[in-house]
Structures are given as structure tokens and as C-alpha cells.
Image (tube, rainbow, N blue to C red):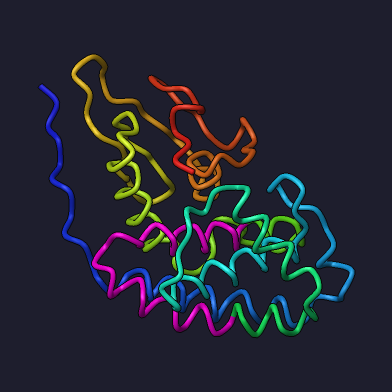
Amino acid sequence: MTVIEPAPARDPRRPARLLQAEHDALLPILHRTPDPGFDRPTVCPGWSVRDVLAHCAAALSRVTAGNLHAFTPALNEIDVAERRAWPLEDILSELAAGYLEGGKAITAAGGKLDVLALGEWLHGGDVRDALGEPLAYASDGYGDACALLADRTRRKATPLLTAYLPGSTLTLGAPRQDRAPATLHASRPALMRLFAGRPAGTSDYQLTGATTAELVVF
């Protein structure tokens, strides 16, 4: 018999806390990055570092203003294209304000928008990765990101999986009557890469009972 752990109660402070962590950790990196660094390509198809930051800033501004759209690739590209004419300083200012104000709006939404905080944090990983910075997909706020990921995987009905990380174990996904739980042994960044659909080195994880394609929740 498989014993399923109950879903933990939502911590309403978690999304804002995660965005605050990203604000405090990523912005100093961006302010010391030379201008050519913002033109580097990222794992997001067709987007540079600057484009990813523009997307993040636009999404948080929409959350703060209550002007959400469906966040499809086409609509996201419209937001990014609009900001390609902006000075870089304006994008970074919008992003900084969004990290702080967006958290309040996400908290007030009662859980419906929590995944946006996780998406912002993951995009911070995309930026660190492109810039060659340490802690890509394993930066400050990792514990809160894992909790939001667990909630996302339950909502998406990802196959039930026990993830064994260095020093901790995490239950992700939802049970299915037709299959046994999967297991994942992974480094901290590899876990996030796999569930976000980012490339992960095969030496960084061992997955049994599921495919990597089944794990992707974005």
C-alpha cells in the first residue's frame, strides 16, 4: 500500500518571500553585469537575458496592476517586444518594483497566482545560467521554490514522485491508480531544471518510473 502524504497548508507569505529573495540576490548581479551580458542567449528560445528580464518585469507589473493575460508565448512576446525599445535601466527598475509589489498582489490572490512567483524565480535561474553565475536554479529561496513546485505538480497531476536531494527528500506530483510512484535522485539545480523543462546533465540525476517529459510543469 502506498501512503500518500497530505498536501501541506499554504503559507500565504511564501510567494512574496520568494520574490524578495530574488530581488535581494539577482539585482546586485544585474547591476554589476556589463551591457553586453544582457545580449547573451538564454534557454528560453529566441530570448536574450534582457528579454527574459523584460518578460519577468512585465508579468509582475501585470500582477500588480490586476491586468493579467493568459501568459501564452505569443502574448509574452508582445510584452517583451514592447520593452525592447526601453532603456535597460527602465527594465531593471520595473523588475525591482515588481519583485516587491507583485508579491503583495500574489498573496492577496489566495493561492491562484502562487505559480507566478515560482516562474519568476526559475527565470532568475535562466538569467544566472546565461551569465555563468553560480547557483543557477538553486539560489536563495530554494526551499520556498520547492514548496511552490510541490503544489504546482499536484495541480498538474504530475506522476507521484519521491525526489531525493542532498540532505532532504521531497514528495511531488499526485498519485495515479495505474502506476507506482517514481523516484528521482538529483542535485538541487537538476530537480528544478527537470520540472521547468530546462536542460539537465544526465550525470546530475537518476530518474526511475517516469520520463523527463512527464515532469515538465511549465
Q: Position of residue 11 (x, y in %)?
A: 23, 67
Question: Residue 58 location, x and y as percent?
Answer: 59, 69
Query: How many numbered circles does the render carry?
Result: 0
181 part of magenta stretch: no
Residue closest to the eye, 58 or 97: 58
Residue 110 counted in the magenta span? yes
Q: Residue 110: image x %, image y %?
A: 24, 67
Relative to 17, does residue 136 appear above or below in the rendering? above
Q: Nearer the viewer, residue 177 or 5?
A: 177
User: Viewed as shown, does residue 99 lie left or right of 155?
Assistant: right
- Indicate the position of residue 129 as horizontal and vertical percent values: 70, 56
Quick one: quadrant of the N terminus? Answer: top left
- At 54% from the left and 85% from the top, the residue drawn is 97
Compared across the picture, whether 156 is left or right of 45 comes to left
Residues shaded magenta: 96-125
Q: Of residues 12 and 78, which is closer to you in this image?
A: 78
Dominant SS in magenta:
helix
Residue drawn at x 49%, y 71% as measured from the top left: 62
Q: Is residue 46 above or below residue 78?
A: above
Q: Is residue 137 left or right of residue 17?
A: right
Q: Residue at x 61, y 32 (%)?
A: 203
Q: What residue is drawn where x is 53% and y is 73%? A: 22
Q: Is residue 35 left or right of residue 25?
A: right
Q: Quadrant of residue 82?
A: bottom right
Q: Residue furthest right?
A: 36
Question: Which residue, as the protein is rendered here, is positioned at the far top?
Answer: 178
Between residue 196 and residue 98, name the one nearer to us.
98
Which of the 4 image quadrants contains residue 215? top left
